[in-house]
Structure formats: C-alpha cells, structure tokens
Image (cartoon, helix red, strand yellow):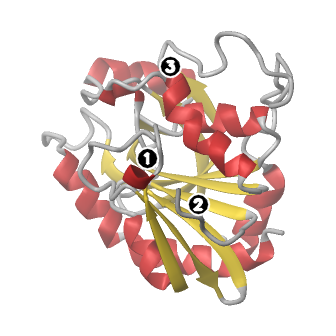
Amino acid sequence: MLRLPPAKIAVVLGSGLGNFADALSHTQVLPYSKISDFPVSTVEGHTGQFVHGFVGKTPVLLMQGRVHRYEGYTAQQVISPIRMLKTWGIEKLILTNAAGGINHQFEVGDLMLITDHLNLTGDNPLVGPNDPRLGTRFPDMSDAYSRRLRDLAKSMQPDLREGVYAGMLGPCYETPAEIRMLQILGADAVGMSTVFETIAATHLSIETMGISCICNKAAGFSGVKLTHEEVTAAGKAASKKFTDLLIRLIPELL
C-alpha cells in the first residue's frame, strides 16, 4: 500500500464539499481503491480518495468521500476508515456532511456546528465483541462533539449555526411526517451519515467536531421534491464559506 506523510488532523468531506482539497498545498493523493479491503464510495459527489496536504504549515489529511450504511456496507465497514485514521496518528477529526434543515431559522447554505446527535439508524458500529485496545466497552457520548472545538470555531465565525443532527439510515429522504417527528425530538438538521463515525471516533478517544452544510429544506418545508443533485449543488455553492472556516480553524486545532 502507498504511504502518505504524517498528520494529526483529518477531515471527512461530505457531499458537495470535496473541493476543499483545492485549498491545500503540496498535496499527495491515495485512492481508496489502492488500499486492500477498504470500502469504496458508490455515491455521486464522493470522489473516494485520501488527500494529504498543508493548510499553511499545518499538515492535514482529507477523506474526499465516505461510505454509508445504505450502500450495503455494514456499520463496522463504515467506521473502518476512522479506525485506520487512528492507526495513522490522527488526534483531531472534523466530520462534515450535507444535511436537510429542520430548524426554521436555518437557510440553505448555512453551516451548523453539531452539538449532539440522534442515532435513528437502528444500528451501532460498536455492536459485537469489544477490543479494549481500541476503547472501553461503554464509551461516554456526553461530549462526542467537542465543546472546546465548537467554541474555537465560533470565536472565528460567530454566525455559525449550532444544533442537533439526526442520523437516519436512508437512502430515501424522510417523509414530512418523519420530519415532524424529528422536530418533536429536538433535531435541527437531518442526514444519512456522521453518527457512526462519531461513535467510532469517541470510542477511539479522537477529539471530534461535526459541521453540517444545510443543503436543502427538509421534506414538507419547501414544497419541492428533494434530489441528490440539489444537495450536491448547494454544498458546492457553500464551499467558499466552508473553506474559509477550515483554513482559519485547522492551524489552531492542536
């Protein structure tokens, strides 16, 4: 397997957000297909490669694309990249995603710092035997999305939204009734990723933050049909705001 230079910070790029790699200097690329038994994304907008580069003088490792449970992978396969990142020396992790806005105060293009999540997938990647070398049998999730990192991001970009992310299994978008249910449960945004990776990162003691790009109004709010093309396009449209935040944030994480 090809090797990439070391880094302590990693970013998982969600749908439409892969262009952040263009902001890095001195980049090196490792396609997922070159790694034995590595899960390869089948979804448009997920390139499927690691990109190592620098933000200023800070080395960072990007995942351009992720895999999802709805693609047919097991929950354990979905988190295998996070466990690989740990073996590569990653200490800080930024998970990003495209999400549907449930909070009526949110607009398409807003960035939301995830404060907490609802795992409504019906699954958990830690089910099964626990390897104590990776983490405790019963990990504490009370600060899964690091308050320290959220406060740091807010100090740089005060207009960032904050809220609870509801993780659904997918691949179909939610019904209007399901969105009303999520409102009652306290969700501010909804998507089909991130929760498994956060659970795995917490289990591995990787300090984690999550950023959702609000790429559409959730079902029943806009009066239009939801499409993946709309989500990807909205992510690309928000990429400048997203890139500006990460360029300022990444050098301050360690």
- Residue at the spot x=59%, y=75% of the render? 245
Residue 90, numbered circle: none
Spatial CA span between label 2 and label 3: 24 Å
Tell me the residue that label 2 is attached to: 11
Q: Which quadrant is home to the C terminus?
A: bottom right
Q: Earlier in the sequence, mark 2 or mark 1?
A: 2
Disc 2 on helix, strand or loop? strand
Q: Nearer the viewer, residue 169 or 201?
A: 201
Q: Mark 1 — residue?
A: 66
From this view, report whether residue 187 is shown above or below residue 14. Answer: above
Q: Position of residue 251 (x, y in %)?
A: 74, 79
Q: Which picture quadrant has residue 219?
A: top left
| Residue type indicated by callout 3 | Leu
Mark closer to the observer (2, 3)? 2
In the image, taking residue 14 as reference, residue 123 lies left or right, namely right
Per the image, the residue denoted by label 3 is: 120
